[in-house]
Every structure is written in C-alpha cells, then in structure tokens.
Image: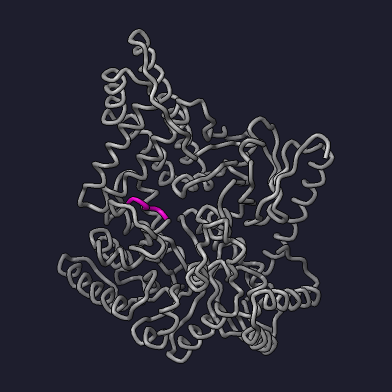
C-alpha cells in the first residue's frame, strides 16, 4: 500500500478510530552506571530537576483535563502522582546519590527507587505496601523524561482526540482512557481479558492489542487508524483510505444508534422468557453509559479501582462509603453488585505481599488475600454496610476467587460482626444484604450445590474460569490460541453452576467477557442463565439478540453444544446459529 503501512494485531473492542498518535513507552530500558566528571555534576543535577519539572507539568495538565472532562475524583490520580514526584524523599535523595557517587541521573534514580521499594516491602501495613506501585509509575515517567523517550501528553480541549499507542500500559495508566482525550487504543501487548482491554470496551473505545513492532512503526507518524473490527492499525494511510474508514466509522455509529432505539424494551425472548441485563463498570464515570445502554443494575463493580482513584493516598472508610453510596443511588431498586478487592495475582498489586510469588495467579489473591491480610478488607466491608444503611436494599457483595464453602461462611460472619460494631457506633446498617460467591475456580463449580446453600447468589467469572479449567494463562501470548471459552469443559461447568443455582432458587449472573459475546448469547440463554452482565456498549447488541431468540431454540442449541467434543466444533456450530439468527433479524452485528 503506497503512502502507508498496515500492522495486524488482535481486535478486542469494536469500532473505527482515526486521529494523531500519542505514543507511550512503558517498558523499562536498561540503565547503565556512568561516571560523571566532577565539573559536570551540577549539570547532571539540573538535568534531573528539569526532567522532573517537565513530568510534573504534564501531570498537572492531565489533572486539569481530567477535572474538566470527567470529574475531580480522576484528577486526584494525576495530582497525587505529581505530589509524589515533588516529594523531597525522592528527588533530594537522587540528587544526593548523583553528588556523592558522581554518577548519571538515571543510575541514581534507579538505586533510590530500589531502596524505597525495599522500605515499602518491610512495612506491615498492606495499604502502604501497595503504594510502591505508584512510586514505580512516577519513577517510570521520570526515567522516560531523562532518556528522551515519548511520554503521554495531554491533549488540549478543543483539539482532535488522539490514538493512544503503547508497548504496554498498566491499569493505573489505563484510567487515562476515561478522560476523553483518547478515541482509540493500540498496544504491543495485551489480550481479550486484560484490564486495559476491559476498560476500553466499557468506554466504547476501539482497540487493537498484540501488534508487534507498533511503537517503532508509529513513532514518527502523523495519523493512525485503529480498526477494532479487523484488528488492523494503519499508519499514515492514503487520504482515499482515510475517507473509506470515515464512512465505515459513521456506518458503525449509525448501527449503534439503531440498536439504542430498543434499550427501553424488555430483554425477553420470542416465547416470553425473561433475562436481566446488567453492566460491568470500573469507574463511577461509567454509570451514565450503563444507564444509556439500558442496564437494569450493576452486575460487577471492580472495587479495586477505588485504590487507583485514591492513589497514592489510601481510600479510607469515608471515601469508600461515598463511592459505594453513589453507585447504589444510581440504580435505586435494582441490584448493584460490588466485587470486594481482587488484589494480588497479576492485577493491581504484584508487589503487595512484600515478596514475589512463583505463580501469582495461583497464589494469594481474591478472598484468600482479604482473609489472610484483613486490614483493608475490614475497612471495605464496613464502608459497604454504611453505604447501604437502612434506606438502600439493592447491595450485593460479591466475594472473588471462592474455592471453599468456609470462605463464604467466614465473610458472612465477619459482615454480621461488623454490622453490630457499626450499630454500636450509631451507624445505620441494612437488615438484610446479599453475599454472593464468584465462581471462577473449577473446584467451586464442582461444589456449586453446596456453595448455593451458603451464598445468596452466584456470579460466574468466565475469564478466570476458562483460564483455570484449561490451564492457560490468559495473559501469555504464547498460549493465547489455547484460551477457548467455548471448550466443552467450560460449557459443562457453566451448565453445572447454573443448574445448581436454579435448584437452590438463587440468582446466577455471568459477568465475564463471554456475557457480551454474540456467539455465546444463544447457548447461555439455553443453559438457563438469567442475568448477563457486560461492558455498557454491548448491552444493546445482546438485548437485540435476546429479543430475536426463542427460548426453546436456545435450549436446543445448548444441548447440542454440550454434546460436542471440541472447542472448534462448538465455535463453528454457534457461528452458524448466530448467522441464521442475524439473517432472520435482518441486522448486522460485527463480531
């Protein structure tokens, strides 16, 4: 193709985005020790201070942009990092090392950060140990400035939104997607279920991940197109091709508007089988999108992002209470499901434990971490009970990574004890509240009938359930092709979980990415799933599919899929069924 270059990756969030690239390199570059001539030491200190000033100015501009576009709570993220960058404990110590050892600023910064991280790891307070993630973020930005590498720049209001292009982006930076400055996203790493991908989907931002050589190819370009349908990133395309993609983008927006016309209609099948459509959200900013999409409540609020919003200060009980109360008030009389902190593993706190784990995905995370390190768990549970008070009856507390009946019993006992404690302090607490088990471990699926006697609801997390069932690390690009949610083993576990919940008379929701997959809708309806929870932009599509389905046909589809031997057979069968359904509905939905 003359005049441009097309790169290929994995399409993870549909849509077309066109705009100038904003390139960020987060992978650390090797830092070498360089001796500095004594006459140049003052200049090296000046170089450090100038780099810190540039990084601080950018963070201040990002904070102002976030405050204007999405609110003070997001501005606080950037303000906190700017304050950390200006903390004498960091810069003064780096300067001391430069002068004492006559070394370059990059090496001095590296040594100081290593020492500070070691100090964090010795702290007994789990909250404070978590702050090392913020320190690493700040140090990374300062390193980029010192090394002359590109950093994420704020886009002035009124200017064209940009395409965020990165080698890798941690969840703490992914919050920037919510500021409105980003209209598309592409990265060299990532997958369907990475946290940044999930945020992009929730915000309706077209995204492509796993694009080899992306940063180098885009570094000097002026225009980029992200094709979230086909998984293409077009670098400096010809004007004619740009126009073609603008037409495609408008066509996609037109179809989305058509789908939004049915958001007020109930999600009921042709033979009057009713399901409920809920929204997955990370940030309170997404509540509006959830309501616009016709969500009947929140099926998953990933509460660990309360940590990011408060970073680097700690989200105290009052802050958490205010956040949860706002969420509950946004959907009065409808279920609001808050997942308790799912820290640890590979998510937001790899260094949380003070020492690395050999296999963090199988280590201390989810409810295991909460019960073994109860400092922050107790604060969160108190905040949830206070948020509900006696006026709100829609709180559902979801416990992640449950594998044992005793874990649900322990959490319920703790909640009852904290409720009495709060009443003694004069705080109103709800008379009843729902405590649910997140089923994402095969062991939990196999004892679902016993868990159903202790839990008030089930929430199926298919992202982890698929990973654990198939022994496939969903973040490992080398085995990504083995991550198959439609593997018969996964479907049979889903059938077991849904059936156990139905027999016990408790609600069962599915809040993994599978809930939003058009291929999965008929089989999930046929299995008897009655609550689908997904990123808000997917709600109209799933609603339209449900309204075009017959429950009897869906049951037939589910029975046939359960009898198949391979994921490939299931996928081909479901694709055929979906194609027939779409032809009958006379609508187009891009997979």
Q: Residue furthest top?
A: 39
Query: Residue at coordinates 39% horizontally, 49% vertically from top-left?
Result: 308
Expressed as whole percent of the image width and height from the top left, the position of residue 295 reads 55, 68
Classify residue 346 as left or right of residue 433: right
Q: From the image, which quarter does the N terminus lie in?
A: top right
The secondary structure that dominates the magenta segment is loop
189 w.r.t. 426: above or below: above
Q: What span is colored magenta in the figure?
A: 347-351
Q: Nearer the viewer, residue 280 or 347?
A: 347
**At which x and y percent is residue 534?**
55, 66
**Residue 321 visible in the shown view:** yes
Where is residue 111 shown, x and y percent of the image?
A: 32, 32
Residue 228 is covered by the magenta coloring: no
Q: Nearer the viewer, residue 152 or 1?
A: 1
Count of number-bearing discs: 0
Instruction: Return the residue found at the far bottom.
Output: 503
The image's colouring method is: one colour
- Give 73 or 437, whichever is nearer the viewer: 437
Q: Position of residue 76 (x, y in %)?
A: 39, 42
Please tell me whether residue 506 is drawn above or below residue 267 in the rendered image: below
Residue drawn at the location 48% of the way across and 83% of the way down: 497
Q: Is residue 102 above or below residue 525?
A: above
Decide if residue 395 is on the left or right side of residue 225: left
Which residue is located at x 44 percent, y 63 percent?
A: 301
Question: Hey, which quadrant is residue 381 in on the image?
Answer: bottom left
Look at 60% across and 68% down and name the residue there: 516
Answer with the quarter of the image where residue 556 lies.
bottom right
- Residue 272 visible? The answer is no
**Which quarter of the figure is the C terminus placed in?**
bottom right
């Amino acid at each position: 193709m003359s005049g441009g270059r097309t790169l290929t990756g994995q399409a993870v969030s549909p849509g077309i985005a066109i705009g100038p690239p904003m390139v960020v390199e987060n992978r650390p570059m090797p830092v070498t020790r360089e001796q500095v001539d004594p006459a140049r030491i003052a200049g090296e200190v000046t170089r450090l201070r100038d780099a810190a000033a540039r990084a601080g100015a950018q963070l201040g501009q990002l904070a102002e942009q976030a405050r204007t576009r999405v609110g003070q709570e997001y501005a606080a993220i950037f303000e906190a990092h700017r304050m950390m960058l200006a903390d004498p404990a960091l810069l003064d110590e780096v300067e001391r090392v430069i002068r004492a050892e006559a070394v370059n600023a990059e090496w001095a910064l590296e040594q100081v950060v290593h020492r500070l991280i070691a100090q964090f790891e010795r702290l007994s307070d789990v909250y404070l140990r978590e702050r090392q993630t913020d320190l690493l973020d700040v140090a990374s930005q300062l390193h980029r400035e010192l090394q002359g590498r590109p950093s994420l720049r704020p886009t002035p209001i009124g200017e064209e939104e940009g395409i965020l292009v990165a080698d890798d982006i941690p969840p703490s930076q992914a919050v920037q997607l919510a500021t409105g400055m980003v209209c598309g996203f592409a990265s060299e790493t990532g997958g369907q279920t990475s946290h940044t991908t999930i945020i992009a989907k929730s915000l309706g931002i077209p995204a492509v991940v796993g694009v080899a050589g992306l940063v180098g190819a885009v570094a000097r370009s002026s225009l980029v197109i992200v094709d979230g349908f086909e998984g293409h990133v077009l670098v400096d395309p010809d004007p004619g091709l740009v126009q073609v993609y603008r037409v495609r983008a408008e066509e996609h927006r037109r179809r989305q508007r058509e789908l939004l016309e049915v958001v007020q209609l109930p999600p009921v099948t042709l033979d009057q089988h009713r399901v409920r459509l809920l929204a997955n959200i990370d940030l309170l900013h997404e509540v509006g999108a959830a309501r616009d999409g016709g969500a009947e409540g929140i099926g998953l609020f990933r509460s660990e992002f309360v940590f990011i919003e408060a970073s680097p200060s700690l989200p105290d009980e009052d802050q958490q209470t205010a956040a949860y109360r706002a969420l509950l008030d946004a959907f009065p009389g409808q279920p609001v499901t808050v997942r308790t902190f799912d820290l640890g593993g590979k998510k937001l706190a790899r260094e949380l434990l003070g020492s690395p784990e050999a296999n963090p995905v199988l280590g201390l995370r989810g409810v295991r971490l909460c019960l073994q390190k109860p400092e922050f768990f107790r604060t969160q549970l108190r905040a949830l009970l206070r948020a509900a008070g006696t006026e709100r009856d829609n709180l559902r507390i979801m416990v992640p990574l449950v594998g044992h009946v005793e874990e649900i019993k322990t959490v319920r006992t703790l909640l009852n004890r904290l409720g009495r404690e709060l009443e003694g302090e004069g705080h109103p607490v709800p008379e009843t509240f729902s405590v649910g088990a997140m089923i994402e471990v095969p062991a939990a699926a196999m004892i679902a009938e016993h868990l159903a006697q202790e839990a008030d609801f089930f929430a199926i997390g298919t992202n982890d359930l698929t990973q654990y069932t198939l022994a496939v690390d969903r973040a490992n690009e080398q085995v990504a092709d083995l991550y198959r949610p439609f593997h018969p083993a996964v479907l049979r576990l889903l059938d077991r979980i849904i059936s156990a919940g139905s027999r016990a008379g408790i609600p069962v929701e599915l809040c993994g990415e599978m809930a939003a997959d058009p291929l999965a809708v008929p089989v999930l309806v046929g299995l008897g799933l009655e609550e689908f929870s997904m990123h808000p932009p997917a709600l109209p599509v799933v609603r339209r599919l449900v309204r075009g389905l017959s429950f009897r046909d869906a049951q037939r589809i589910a029975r046939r899929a359960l009898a198949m031997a391979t994921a490939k057979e299931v996928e081909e069968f479901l694709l055929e069924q979906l194609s027939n359904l779409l032809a009958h509905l006379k609508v187009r939905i891009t997979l």
